[in-house]
Image (cartoon, rainbow, N blue to C red):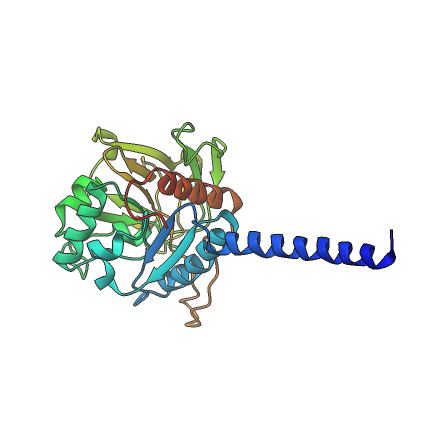
Amino acid sequence: MPSGKIKRKSIYLIACCVVCFLISSAQAQTGSSKFKVIGFFTSRNDQAHISFVHESNSWFAKMAAKYNFTYDSTKDWNNLNSEFLSQYQVVLFFDTRPDNPTHRLAFQKYMENGGAWMGFHFAGFALTPSDFPQNWDWYHNQFLGSGSYVSNTWRPTSAILRVEDRKHPATKHLPKTFKSSPSEWYRWSNDLRKNADIKILLSIDSTSFPLGTGPKPHEIWHSGYYPVVWTNKNYKMIYLNMGHNDMDYENKTNKQLSFTYDNKIQNRLILDALIWLGSGSKKGKRK
């Protein structure tokens, strides 16, 4: 075969390969993702919560790129409306809950119509009187089931967590027990074990006690039952009590001393929970 034809054929094959590569790359970039996630946050007041929000936004963005879902975030709670939420299959609350009655109603309708939700730590907080009173019964008593905040451990510390249900999609890859990242752990007014709608997935194992270092005696737990991850069977949701990093408050540097996502086993829990929520949500326009 003449050399000119060989060269032309080689160029043609190379060109075809380049075109195929560009097409596949474009499809990967513009094709439909598995699901879309929107994270809501406030990021104010407590430096521990602020650092957790920054860490979360970075981690979820990395997971989105790796596992082919779309991740967006916003601190504008006015976006908590039906039109905006219709774009997303999963909603995240990182460091608070909505206070505006219109926003609350939009979120309730979103969940009742098949949306999915993951909440962390302070998203479950409610205490009357405080800046975050328990004035939303549907959310705290029916949806979360936990009622009001009662007390917490201090300082933020790791706990040995026990998996209560290893058959759930969020926990299927977890060992029976594992050591969590440091966090501030909450006690609630309602006993979740008595709520037939609540499925407790993880709780604090007794080997964690004493849990906390004080200095106040009531900030150290010596016994008791404390659920830290659970779901409500009537909704596509999961709550995780993790989400409070340890900070250098004593020296007033506000240096971050611990990282929530610096824990492979705990990250597996969060990722599997998110994939379960996203794959099963019936809400939103899949684009």
Relative height, residue 99 to residue 230 (above, below) = below
Question: Which x, y percent locates residue 272?
Answer: 44, 40
- The number of discs equals 0
Question: Which x, y percent locates residue 14?
Answer: 71, 56
Camera-side residue of 254 and 14:
14
Q: Quadrant of residue 199?
A: top left
Question: Which x, y percent locates residue 105?
Answer: 14, 51
Which residue is drawn at the image coordinates 41% and 67% (left, top)?
250
158 sits left or right of 229 in the view: right
Which residue is drawn at the image coordinates 68% and 57% (left, top)?
15
Residue at the far bottom in the pictured view: 252
233 sits left or right of 243 in the view: left
Which residue is drawn at the image coordinates 43% and 29% (left, top)?
166
Residue 189 visible in the snapshot: no
Camera-side residue of 170 and 47:
170
Question: Which x, y percent locates residue 273?
Answer: 40, 41
Residue at the far right in the pictured view: 2
Camera-side residue of 73 and 155:
73
Q: Quadrant of residue 221?
A: top left
Residue 213 visible in the snapshot: yes
